Amino acid sequence: MELIAAPLLSGVYGGDTAALSAASVLPRFLAYEKEYGSLIRGARREVRQKKSREPLFQSFRDGMQVLTDSLARAAGGRLSVVHAEVSQVRRSGSVWQVRAGEQTLSSPDLVLACPAYTSARLLENSAAPLAQDLSAIPYSSAILVTLVYERAALERSLDGFGFLVPAHERQVLAAATWVNVKFPIRAPSHLAVLRGFVVDPQATGLLQVPDAEIIGLVRKDFSRWMGTSVAPLFSTIYRWPDSMPQYVVGHSQRYARIKQLLEQYPGLHLAGNAYDGVGIPDCIRRAQDISKRVIDRCV
């Protein structure tokens, strides 16, 4: 657990892995244990049953923005964007009213595709019991630092997709991905792209630290684990405060209450990664389910 499962979970969820709910974050592993009596035996059986030879990791050739750009094009003229902060959400008869800047928008259906704590703030006056459960979902922060090198300048081969760091050995980095190996189309063959992940508790403590200092700490950690002594050609840094929901023990029970409470507020829908899956495929699946429910209400 300490050397394999915990670093893996920390790389995905951040935060305190000991507080996470196995039923919520690793339901397949629980099924393996129940059916086969062993996680490894269950995983091996599943691999043998797979017929396709698809790559282990897949993404868009031109980056994740392809997804949102494609959605915008598909929406065409049916999409209206309001550039204003939402200050209030309330129920009025059979419609939901949203106060955005100086405008009030009304619709029988309202989809809140934002962090649970933001949804809680917007619903605290119109759906207080629901807001209470939403505000109880904890979040962790993350910082992503990417360093680009001449591949020939690195002192070791990139014979994998990256690495994970157990908590007791961690200084700054919790995980790292070798982007040019994981997604070869993302970088020319002569470059090596190392992406470091800083998660909580380290990330929260570094959110206000200058970029150069964080990059220096990450470089020092890469040197520690990979022996990289040369300076990178360039680097980028992105801070993601309170960005990753934590499926802590009791999450499934809280989510069950949220679903029950939603039934008391017709037309209200909650999208995003705070409920039943943190990955992009999970969010897409949830969005499709919401779309079907909205359509069913219209016919």
Image: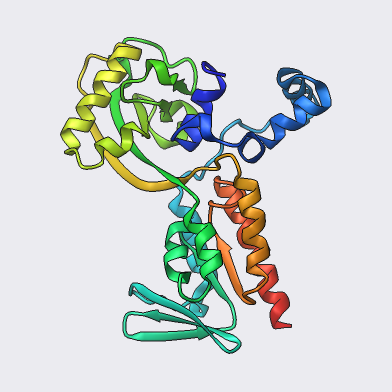
Q: Where is residue 162 drawn, in percent x and y? A: 45, 22
Q: Nearer the viewer, residue 79 or 275?
A: 275
Residue at 22%, 30% (x, y): give it: 215
The percent position of residue 246, horizontal first and vertical second, equals 50, 43
Q: Quadrant of the N terminus?
A: top right
Identify the residue at horizontal 69%, vertical 82% (top origin).
298
Residue 282 horizontal side relative to residue 51, left or right: left
Name which residue lies at 82% across and 22% down.
36
Height in image: 106 above or below 263?
below
Which quadrant of the structure image shows residue 109?
bottom right
Q: Nearer the viewer, residue 10 or 264?
A: 264
Image quadrant containing the C terminus: bottom right
Res 99 quadrant in image: bottom left
**4 sits left or right of 154 in the view:** right
Work out which residue is located at the far bottom of the displayed protein and give it: 93
Q: Is residue 115 above or below residue 143?
A: below
What x and y, as percent, mark residue 225?
Answer: 35, 13
Asked if residue 62 can be seen in this view, the reply is no
